[in-house]
Amino acid sequence: MLAFIIRRGLLSLLILFLAVSLLFGMIHIAPGDPASVMLGPRATPELKAEFARRMGLDQPLVMQLGTFYARLAHGDLGVDPFSERKVSEIVFEQLPFTLILVLTAIGGASLVGIPLGCFSAIRRNSLLDRLTAVMSVAFIAIPSFVVALYLLLWLAVSLRWFPAIGAGETGNYADQARHLVLPAVALGLGWVGYIARLVRSSMLEVMEENHIRTARAFGLPERTIIVHYALRIALLPTVTILGMGIGSMLSGALFAEIVFSRPGIGKLLYEAVLTRNYPIVMGAVLVTTGFFVFSTLVSDVVNAMLDPRLRERPGE
Amino acid sequence: MSQPVLKIRDLSVSYQTEAGPLQALRDVTFAVPAGKIIGIVGESGCGKSTLISTIIRLIAPNARIGKGSILFKGDDLLRMTSAEMRALRGDEISMVFQDPMTSLNPVRPIGRQMADVQHRDALSRREKNARSESMLGRVGIPDPAAQLTRYPHQLSGGMRQRVAIAMALMAEPSLLIADEPTTALDATLEVQIIHRLQELQRDFGCSILFISHHLGVIAELCDEVVVMYAGEVVESGPMRDVFLEPRHPYTRKLLECDPARIAEPTRDLPVIEGSLPNLVQLPDGCIFRERCPKTIERCGLQRPRLAGDGHQASCHLLDTAE
Ligand SMILES: Nc1ncnc2c1ncn2[C@@H]1O[C@H](COP(=O)(O)OP(=O)(O)OP(=O)(O)O)[C@@H](O)[C@H]1O
Ligand code: SF4
Ligand SMILES: [Mg+2]
């Protein structure tokens, strides 16, 4: 198992390196000159050149990338040209807000979606099954920012059940939790149905497998069969999707953070892109990509824990 | 003679298909006496698996049990509630399935699966493991203690099938049903497993219903044989009688194609020209007529009935002979 984690971890680092280099190139190829955007239309050419030199923008792209990695090796993500603060400081200040949002959303969605999918499979064509089918299609189809807006209008503005904006008072966990509810629901709602449908279809497939018939032929209690024999296998594809889903949730988080005026990586990134603040963009992208790669790593490790066949090297 | 463990009478089962009901079993009648090994032979698709899944009532969702009875120690399994049925499975009746590659759970260690099977016994995990270990030893698995922590994919096909047999014997059932348990194995392994089953049957005194494609295996292992064709029993009786004096033209063909008969058995059932009739639109008269070399006029008009005592067959020629 340890060997598996190490192998998988090294692969993750490689993926991270490739992804970040690619993104680095893309950001720099994108139109818009940071010096003009940041210094304003009236900046003199000398000022702009000086700015570009200070940010290393006059160097070839490969050199810039090299410098980026060299600094990264020392944990240095550069400096924000506006506030003169360290990028790493700014990014890690915002990261927890996004992490807790994404994890609450996906955790909540799994907690509801997995049992729902499981029941729908066992009681196929029951009322619950049909209801989940209809609801999930509806919720998957609605983009999360629309859900976010309506939740905001309805539960926060009209009913005043939940606070509308911000992330809550620092240090006051109850208040922070209350602030988390609406954005997490907005982000996770579509996933409930998605996870339920996914679990349902793989559950139906697994329940047809021969080893389930064997378990039945030994008169095992239905609960044991469902939980220990079937669900564990049925969860494998879902766990993979969840690992990847966290990546797409990070972009969903961007909308939720803007709509609910929550601090977070999404909001930070959004603002940095508008102002062509490359060091911040790179820092935020690095962290989110790292988080995405890490979550797929975790999902692979979880799968290997669930299924012994995955622990072995191919051909072993 | 004591009461048979299993007595099947006029059992008919069909599958709902798009073309209409597929009559997979029709009027199947035979018995499994206590402490005996009964073999069922017949080519692929003749309804062997349908028969045993009906016995333990784990049939496909589109299967319908038309009529008949399956008396197990005098009680009709077809009239039992699902709870009563569940209580019998893995206790009084246990099963070894056709494909050892897929019939064990891939994500649970062997030891856990064997402990799960003992779910009715009030033993500690440790005691259950000790029982599993000794049972694995008895079916001829080397180093049984080490196998308990392994997963099915880490064992060979033969080892897996032994595990499946050990699991089935764990309950000390009155009836063990084995659906082609050796077909997936090579010939030497097959012989080993057959001998092991014979020994175990003697030790535990259970009855075995053994399904096979393989005439040699049946001859080696079984006391009695049931020959099935296209969902019907065409001949049944003591193994020696059926093999030495086959009465039904189908049985004769099977044995004819196998010149060494039981001495040097072929791996699979011999191939007979022609194919199984369409089970959705059954022909009138005898089910074997299209492939039978000896048809007489009555064969197209009337369905023959299973006749004789002890050694039975269903063919019009037998009535005429008498
Ligand atoms: N779920 C099902 N729906 C429709 N037809 C089925 C179904 N299961 C089996 N059949 C048909 O019923 C007949 C008997 O099948 P069965 O599996 O019992 O045969 P078998 O003797 O076990 O064959 P084999 O030796 O290949 O295992 C076949 O014609 C088969 O195609
Ligand atoms: S009844 Fe007729 S067709 Fe059928 S097996 Fe006998 S001889 Fe052949
Ligand atoms: Mg079969």
Image: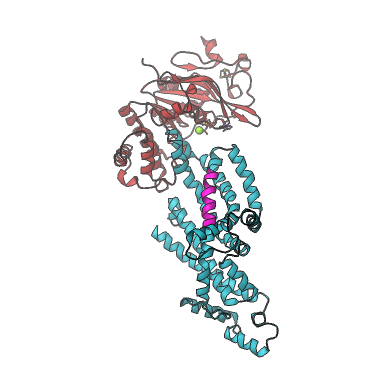
| Image quarter (top left, top right, bottom left or bottom right) of the C terminus of chain A | bottom left
B4 on left or right of A46 = left
Chain identifier, cyan in the render: A
A195 on left or right of A46 = left
B262 on left or right of A87 = left
Which residue is at 63% across, 22% downward? Answer: B283
Q: Position of residue A224 (x, y in %)?
A: 43, 39
Answer yes or no: is residue A39 visible: yes
- Check the image and name the residue furthest to the right: A41
Answer yes or no: is residue B188 visible: no
Q: Position of residue B77 (x, y in %)?
A: 46, 23
Q: Position of residue B305 (x, y in %)?
A: 54, 15
| Image quarter (top left, top right, bottom left or bottom right) of the N terminus of chain A | bottom left
Q: Residues in magenta?
A: A104-118
| Viewer-closest of B289 and A307 | A307
Total tally of numbered discs in the picture? 0
Which residue is at 33% across, 31% downward? Answer: B200
Chain identifier, red in the render: B
Residue A115 belongs to magenta span? yes
What secondary structure is the magenta-colored segment mainly?
helix
| Viewer-closest of A228 and B68 | A228
- Check the image and name the residue furthest to the top: B322
Which residue is at 59% across, 60% downward? Answer: A248
Residue A205 belongs to magenta span? no
- Check the image and name the residue furthest to the bottom: A46
* Quarter, ligand 2: top right
- Indicate how the structure is coloured in the image: by chain
